[in-house]
Amino acid sequence: MALSAGSRDDTVVQAGLQYWETQPASLDGVLGGFGTGSLPRVDALGSRQFLLDLIPDLRSVSSAIRPLRSGDPDPDPAPDPPKPKRCRALDVGAGIGRVTADVLLHLVSDVVVVEPVPSFIEEAHRRCQGTSTSEESTVAGWTGIGDRTKSVSFFKRPLQDFDPARPGRGTEALERLGYIPGDDDADSGFDVIWCQWCLGHLNDEDLVAFLRRSTAALRDSTSVIIVKENLCAEKKAPRTVFDEQDSSWTRSDLAFKKIFEDAGLHLVRQKIQRGLPAGLYPVKMYALRPIL
């Protein structure tokens, strides 16, 4: 069956959701059987490095270069530096929270995850607080949650109508875990919007609209949208391949770049993910910012 990626077909959207509802809420389930090998670690390390190259200020290890000081106390010490802002990220199509746990929480303060499959987001919530019964999970939970230095908020909704600028509107929310701010920060925007292995469930029209809504949710000119997706082959023209098993589209490099252009986004950086198992589609990372 050949389907166009041009406009929404609700039966295809539902078929995609139904497929994932039959998959186990585990690394193997969300990664198509590759959860127990090298893929999760290689993918996470590649993602962290890509993001750090874009936003070096996210590094948690301070520079080893320090100004030399004499032995005498400084008679006029510099004032304390301003308290750093809390960096926020959105993890869309988050599954069981793999990217949040292995990439984003190591680099940012607060993460909002959105995922439409109930069993996946419920498992992500359990893993975050360390109550999952899965052997893949840890009793300690996710980085920064137990000591409340970081936070994760959870929303259940498909991406077709999700608004990143207002993540709590029209969504089903699970309890926020970790740090709780004095003032509601739900609509305060994002420094990073991470989209990985989920955008194939949006047709072209919905994907352009979603990226435009994501642009409106970026905090400032240094904020970035990351797309990390499989690529199909092409011959000098955009190409899209429909997968009848999970009702998703795999796009070619030129197909993605056409989508980005239509969404008013500028390609800042791109990189192929190396080191993944043989036989898989090539995986590419794109860093995007609004065209000024």
Image: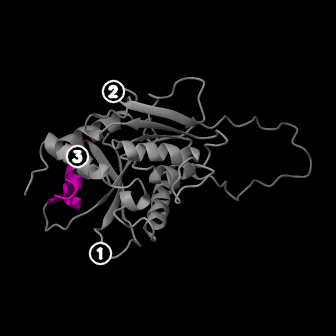
Amino acid found under the numbered disc labelled 1:
Gly
- Magenta residue span: 238-263
**Which residue is outermost to the top?**
183
Residue for badge 3: 202
Amino acid found under the numbered disc labelled 2:
Gly
Give the mark nearest the N terminus, 1 or 2: 2
Helix, strand, or loop for circle 2? loop
**Picture residue at 33% right of the left edge, 76% below the top:** 278
Give the mark nearest the N terminus, 3 or 2: 2
Say whether residue 259 is magenta.
Answer: yes
Say whether residue 86 is magenta.
Answer: no
Which quadrant of the figure contains the N terminus?
Answer: bottom left
25 vs 81, nearest the viewer = 25
C-alpha gap between disc 3 and disc 2 = 19 Å
Q: Is residue 17 visible?
A: yes
**Which residue is outermost to the front?**
133
Helix, strand, or loop for circle 3? loop
Left or right, 164 with respect to 108, comes to: left
Residue 245 locus on image (x, y percent): 20, 59
**Which residue is outermost to the right?**
72
Residue for badge 2: 170
Q: Is residue 192 above or below residue 249?
A: above
Residue 23 locus on image (x, y percent): 33, 55
Amino acid found under the numbered disc labelled 3:
Leu
Residue for badge 1: 279
Mark 1 and mark 2 in contact? Answer it, CB < 8 Å. Answer: no
